[in-house]
Amino acid sequence: MKVGVAGLGVMGRAMARNLASAGLLAGVWNRTRSRGEAVAEELNVSLADDPAALARLCEVVITCVSADEDLLEVIEALRPGLAAGKVVVDTSTVGVDTAETVAERLHEEGVAFLDAPVTGGPEGAEAGTLQIMVGGDPEVLERIQPAMLAIGSQATHFGPAGYGQRAKAVNQVMVAGIVQAISEALSFADASGLDTERLLPVLTGGAAGSRLLERRGSRILAGDFEPGFRVVLHHKDLNLCRRLLQSMDVNLPMVEMTIKHYERLIEQGYGEEDTSALYRLKRQLFETGNRKSL
Ligand code: NA7
């Protein structure tokens, strides 16, 4: 199976590396050519001149770009090189409606589309241990399993087009709660004068334990918010969740609050930091107080 990757950012680059290790990567493409050149040279695969050339070369094209408009642009650029029987797998996090639109457009040409957003962050992408949430034809998923298992531990099918993105939206709501809880509790611990180095293993080993706390706890307390998973990306994802929730006539309080907090961080110039930079806002509360507003 010949697989190509279009979009070699933090996540796409790591996926390309794992596909190359599995002997499945035939080529890559990236909008900023210098990035593409570096990856093609490192992995010894061809760098396509444009998305259509990548689509001509491969049976399966994995896209990994930033947001909805970007995906729609890349899909249009892939189309001249796609043909019946080929498969496009999008691992970006985009709206359910966008995934449905892309699936419909490609279906008209006999091209299968799977929406396959991932969770596990850059660490999971590098280790090839992502969880992949899939919408689309389960038989197509079955056919391309080797590619999925090169980039992740498991690809779980949830339903027709858009259902991968629905599952991802649920994941992103839960992640918001975890980041909120950790940043709030650790700022409280620090302001209380506790020995946080003693406290961290206790929290990690007990009911409050989580992967994020394990990976990031000491770094958060040391004021190290290097990404990781960037504030701007989670902000984008929570806006997608909000859109989906509004179609159900619901506002979820934690989603609304986290969007507001991320907007404050972005205004203060911290949008490119890890989401755990929420700690900055929580710590500020202990300096300035906020009895009146959240
Ligand atoms: P990055 O590291 O910001 O990478 C984004 C990639 O998407 C990068 O290769 C970009 O190319 C590419 N991109 C963005 N917009 C476009 C358009 N319009 N056309 C073509 N290529 C584009 O993000 P991550 O890898 O962390 O995340 C990717 C997705 O996975 C995102 O949806 C996350 O929420 C989950 P560039 O190099 O800038 O030219």
Image: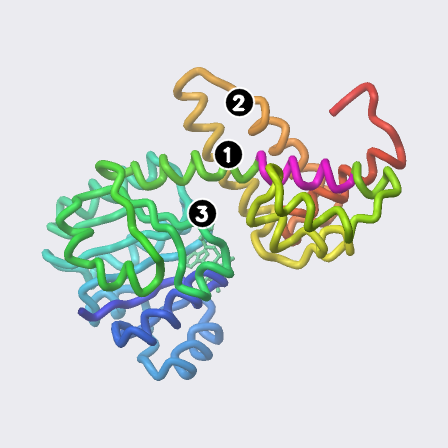
Residue drawn at x 86%, y 38% is 192
Q: Residue 133, which numbered label? A: none
- The residue mark sitting in front, 2 or 3, is 2
Q: Earlier in the sequence, mark 2 or mark 1?
A: 1
Asked which quadrant contains residue 187, the reply is top right
Point out the tag, 1 or 3, that comes first from the N-terminus.
3
Tell me which label, 2 or 3, sits earlier in the chain. Answer: 3
Q: How far across and down, in percent of the image, does residue 127 sit?
A: 44, 65
Give the amino acid at mark 1.
Val
Assign a secondary structure to mark 3.
loop
Q: Nearer the viewer, residue 277 or 84?
A: 277
**Mark 2 C-beta to ligand 1 under 8 Å:** no
- Mark 2 vs mark 1, CA separation in Å: 9 Å
For disc 2, the marked residue is 252
Residue 254, image x, y percentages: 58, 27
Q: Which residues are magenta?
A: 177-187
> How crowded is the residue under tag 1: few (<14 C-alpha within 10 Å), some, or many (20+)?
some
Residue at position x 50%, y 59% in the image: 122
The secondary element bearing badge 1 is classed as helix
In this rendering, the answer to whether 195 lies above or below 250 is below
Report if residue 190 lies within the magenta region.
no
Is the C-beta separation of discs 2 and 1 under 8 Å? Answer: yes
Colour basis: rainbow
